[in-house]
Image (tube, helix red, strand yellow):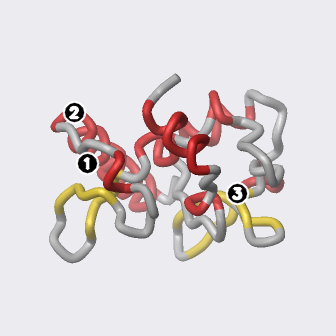
Amino acid sequence: MNKMMDTCLRYGCIKCCLDTKMPLSSLDIARIKDLGFSEDFFILKKNGSRQLKNVSGRCVFHDGQRCVIYDHRPEGCRLYPAILSEEIRTVVLDSYCPHHEQFQLTPSTSREVTRLVRSLDAEKAEGF
């Protein structure tokens, strides 16, 4: 079990799944569609971007107990709480996560977050 899953389960935390604005890449969408979900079910298009929909205040894939697509979740979910800070344009651990101090920000994770943000920006510019 990875550290993120262990930490989230240990604290029973789903805060990042509540009112999520998690962006979706084309690869994320293809992976989730391959599970049998339609785009209309899980994608919210907003300001030229695609993100996970929320139902009853939580991610459409969270059933109240767990993420039903955990092994196939979007890359941004996999990398969280590592995010690109808009203000300082560097990768940080999101203070919104109540347990962010339990995680370690590695150079590898920073590179992955930066690559993902660039990929999402490129897809948005291309109109996906």
Q: Which residue shows up at 31% across the image and 46% down it?
A: 113
- 33, 108: nearer the viewer: 108
Earlier along the polypeptide chain: callout 3 or callout 2?
3
State the CA–CA distance, disc 1 to disc 2.
Answer: 10 Å
Along the horizontal axis of the image, is 51 left or right of 105?
Answer: right
Task: Kindly identify the amino acid type of the residue bearing the numbered disc 2.
Answer: Ser
Task: Label 1: state its secondary structure.
Answer: helix
Residue 44 shown left or right of residue 95 in the figure? right
Sooner in the amino-acid sequence: mark 1 or mark 3: 3
What residue did someone put label 2 on? 108
Label at residue 22: none
Residue 73, quarter of picture: top right
Residue 6: percent from left, percent from top: 52, 34
Viewer-side residue, 115 vs 83 = 83
Closer mark to the observer between disc 1 and disc 3 = 1
Q: Residues within 10 Å of mark 3 (few under 14, many from 20)?
A: some
Residue drawn at (47%, 47%) of the image: 76
Tag 1: Cα neighbours inside 10 Å, few (<14), some, or many (≥20)?
some
* Residue contact between numbered discs 1 and 2, judged by CB atoms under 8 Å: no
Question: Which sits in the foreground, 60 or 81?
Answer: 81
Residue marked by disc 1: 114
Residue 55 falls left or right of residue 2? right
**Residue that label 3 marks:** 43
Indicate the quadrant where residue 34 lies.
Answer: top right
User: Under tag 3, what secondary structure?
Assistant: strand
The location of residue 71, given as percent across then percent down, is: 63, 28
For the residues labelled 1 and 3, the Cα–Cα distance comes to 23 Å
